[in-house]
Amino acid sequence: MEKQNIDWGSLGFGYMPTSASYVSNYKNGAWDDGALTSDHTVTISECAGVLQYSQSVFEGLKAYETVQGKIVTFRPDLNAERMYNSAKRLEMPPFPKDRFVEAVKEVVKANDSWVPPYGSGATLYIRPYMFGSSAVIGVKPADEYQFRILTTPVGPYFKGGAKPITIKIADYDRAAPRGTGHIKAGLNYAMSLHAIVEAHKQGFAENLYPDSKTLTKVEETGGANIIFIKGNKFVTVKSPSILPSVTRRSLEYVAEHYLGMEVEEREIPLTELPEFDECGLCGTAAVISPVGCINDHGKEIKFPSGMEKMGPTIQKLYDTLTGIQMGRIEAPEGWICEIE
């Protein structure tokens, strides 16, 4: 395998077509066998369900080289499970979980020359997605669907180190209490775009959404779960309307089993924010984005960890999880999926 001639260190977080994508179609009540394709375009009816009623779900994970030179992905079975549940919630035929994992392996193997070398800080981003492809004019689920996986090499999320960010308490609801906040649907992210554009204009990196029912408890941000450190406690939100982040669940395990911390999943009142030592946003792209300050309509809540670098505990969490992913630290059984 000869690597593509790319300046891996200068890559941003954008789309670059690679050698192959994966595609499978659902028709007449069944998924076909699926196949790799070099055609990176999608042709659908102007009346397709995804265009008319936003029937679409997606996932995000990464492939990368370990210190041993192996190409691996991280816990793709959890992405498969989450996409399965997301599809069911939108009345879409779930793509089988075992086939999801095999399709990820197949498309990464076909694009192995696009996987950045170990130590570059870059990775191959993997985007599985599914959408209603047949024409729908009445309000109902589509009859046909397409499942695809695209890949694209992306650069390190933090160039020059992870500097703590400032986020704001949002003035909008992220998701209804009994709505779709717990699934990875495109419609959830469309709803967040206006709020994030406004936040950026005001000089903030992200929005922190309170719960939509009482507006008194922490939920999550526009694109990530939120974690807090209080002494030797790892604290995160328990709510039926937040996305079950693969990274957050992995960090909980790392905190308890590698760092000996106490893990709490519970409701977090906004009034408790000043009591925490450290704060971070967790997700696939950055692993952890440290938060130094939360702005609550002009009132600043500054964490003792400061605005210069990650707090000491979040740094340990970050180093341990990325060490597991990159093969520097022994992984729990089943976490690392090798592409052979």
Image (tube, rainbow, N blue to C red):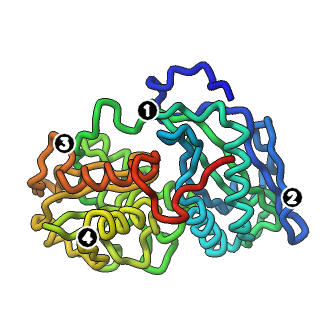
Mark 3 crowdedness (10 Å alpha carbons): few <14, some 14-19, many ≥20 = some
Which label's residue is closer to the chain start, 4 or 3?
4
Looking at the image, is 7 positioned above or below residue 315? above
Instruction: Residue 163: name its quadrant.
Output: top left
Which label's residue is closer to the chain start, 2 or 1?
2
Which label's residue is closer to the chain start, 4 or 2?
2
Q: Amino acid at mark 2?
A: Asp
Q: Secondary structure at mark 2?
A: loop
Q: Which mark is residue 309?
A: 3
Which label's residue is closer to the chain start, 1 or 4?
1
The residue identified by callout 1 is: 119
Q: Spatial distance from mark 4 to mark 3, Cα to Cα?
A: 20 Å
Mark 4 crowdedness (10 Å alpha carbons): few <14, some 14-19, many ≥20 = many
The residue identified by callout 2 is: 33
Q: Amino acid at mark 4?
A: Val
Q: Spatial distance from mark 2 to mark 1, Cα to Cα?
A: 36 Å
Which label's residue is closer to the chain start, 2 or 3?
2
Q: Secondary structure at mark 1?
A: loop
Q: Tell whether label 1 touches label 3 (CB within 8 Å).
A: no
Looking at the image, is 113 positioned above or below residue 52? above
Of residues 308 and 298, the one nearer the viewer is: 308
Q: Which mark is residue 235?
A: 4
Position in image of residue 322 (x %, y %): 39, 49
Q: Secondary structure at mark 4?
A: strand
Position in image of residue 282 (x %, y %): 36, 56
